[in-house]
Amino acid sequence: MVAFCFLAAVFTWGLGVFGASAYLHEITKARGWSVSLVSAGITVFYLTAALVLPAMGATIHRHGSRPVIAGGPVLLALGVAAMGMWPPPGSSMPRSFAWGSATPRCW
């Protein structure tokens, strides 16, 4: 159990929470987009995570902790992969929303 919690924390905080600054730099450098545009997508990620987090207790109560928490890393990996394939600026917000809604499942 301790090992699982450690791995969940490493991936959630590394890929989700603290990885955002690395994504900001790399996406602006690779795509040539403004820092403000990419920062807006990262802000959507953080706001979505904050809004989804309170619902996790009810979701765990309804479906059980194992499927909810086990689905978190899968959704987080898909969100991070979507960040790597960051689309044109207009559709970056839905991907940030999906990434942000996956992160609280891992907390």
Image (tube, helix red, strand yellow):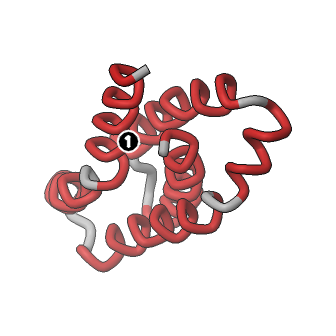
Is 22 displayed left or right of 9 in the figure?
Answer: left
Q: Amino acid at mark 1?
A: Thr
Q: Quadrant of residue 27?
A: bottom left
In depth, the one of 23 and 46 nearer the eye is: 46
Is 105 displayed left or right of 22 in the figure?
Answer: right
Residue 94 percent coordinates (x, y): 59, 57
Residue located at (68% from left, 24% from top): 67
Residue at the bottom extreme of this rendering: 36
- Quarter in which the N terminus is drawn: top left
Q: Residues within 10 Å of mark 1 (few under 14, many from 20)?
A: many
Q: Is residue 72 above or below residue 46?
A: above
Is 71 displayed left or right of 16 in the figure?
Answer: right
Residue at the right extreme of this rendering: 62
Residue located at (50% from left, 47% from top): 103
Count of numbered labels shown in the rendering: 1
Is 61 displayed left or right of 13 in the figure?
Answer: right
In depth, the one of 92 and 12 nearer the eye is: 12
Q: Is residue 76 above or below residue 49?
A: above
In depth, the one of 82 and 5 nearer the eye is: 5
Residue at the front extreme of this rendering: 2
Residue located at (63% from left, 67% from top): 51
Q: Quadrant of residue 50?
A: bottom right
Q: Which residue is mark 1?
A: 12
Residue 91 percent coordinates (x, y): 54, 59
Residue located at (38% from left, 41% from top): 12
Element type where label 1 sits in the image: helix
Residue 43 percent coordinates (x, y): 42, 72
Q: Is residue 95 above or below residue 8?
A: below
